[in-house]
Image (cartoon, rainbow, N blue to C red):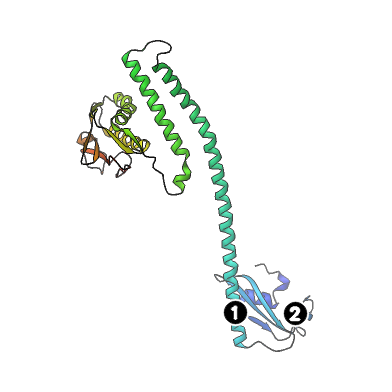
Amino acid sequence: MVIRPHEHDTVVARAALSGRPVQVEDVQTDPRYRSSPTRKASHTRLAVPLLREGVPIGVLVVGREEVRLFTDKEIEFVVSFADQAVIAIENTRLLNEIQDKSRQLEAASRHKSEFLANMSHELRTPLNAIIGFSDVLEQRMYGTLNDQQSDYVRDIAESGRHLLHLVNEILDLSKVGAGRMQLESSEFALSETIRGTLAFVRERAAGHGIALTNDVPADLGTIVADERKIRQVLLNLLSNAVKFTPDGGTIAVRARRGDGEVEVASKTPASASPPGIRPGSSTSSSRSAQPVTAPGRGPGSG
């Protein structure tokens, strides 16, 4: 609240500066109000400061058309009204701030959506090209491939499809923002999913001299779950196994079915476990007829 130097003697200024109610018995005879434009509007005048945390933000002024001082009870009533006015003003200020923040968040959300929409095209286009060219090579349309080349081409295509699935999942941030993620359950062969995930980390493991052993039976059968989520859980599991396995080590992956559920485990040397995680094997299990949930301490550990 701004008070000009020539206003310091007015009832409004005195109330604001003192932080207490101030009244003038008759402004018509008070020399401090000779030049006041509201001088003829009333005789007795009461000014009560509007205080927010002890700081004046305004002054509430009431007057009488007759010369009669306000009683203590009347002053107490006006003070109470002023306190309620301060609360109302503060609530309005906070509401305006919230609305302003909401508008900023809406703008940020809109910019995020526009960015993701643009990145959707930028990411999907090269991935689709990688997948398409890999399929062309795998079909041997431009010449034959030896067994190792065929495996690599198949791995490239599978990795590209997996990355495309991840891109689609990242772009669907509205589900995450709503605090829920819908599972898209389907029946699929778990052994094929495990082998595809192994192929995704095979080159990284080979670069560190780490051997991957696959003890997944071909007759493991099918499960009903969200294949993309299962693939991501397995990828996290194996990526951490590669990350914390010493060069020249071995990672053993096995899967077993029993009692209506399937258990998938990766076993690494004791020295391969990160700090705070028990060495040995990490597992992920699911019931064959229900969507999968994989408890864990973090990405890749179960």
Question: Amino acid under label 1?
Answer: Val
Q: Nearer the viewer, residue 214 or 222?
A: 222
Q: Give the structural element (helix, strand or loop) at label 1.
A: helix
Figure check: 142 above or below 176: above
Task: Give me the C-alpha separation between circle 2 and circle 1.
Answer: 24 Å
Q: Nearer the viewer, residue 15 or 259?
A: 259
Question: Amino acid under label 2?
Answer: Arg
Tell me where residue 55 appears, x and y as whole percent: 58, 70
Which residue, given by chain and number where applicable, does mark 2 sit on? 32
Work out whether mark 2 precedes mark 1 in sequence or the reverse, and give the earlier one.
2
Q: Quadrant of residue 19?
A: bottom right
Q: Give the structural element (helix, strand or loop) at label 2.
A: helix
Q: Quadrant of residue 33?
A: bottom right
Figure check: 297 above or below 158: below
Figure check: 77 above or below 299: below
Q: Nearer the viewer, residue 192 or 4?
A: 192
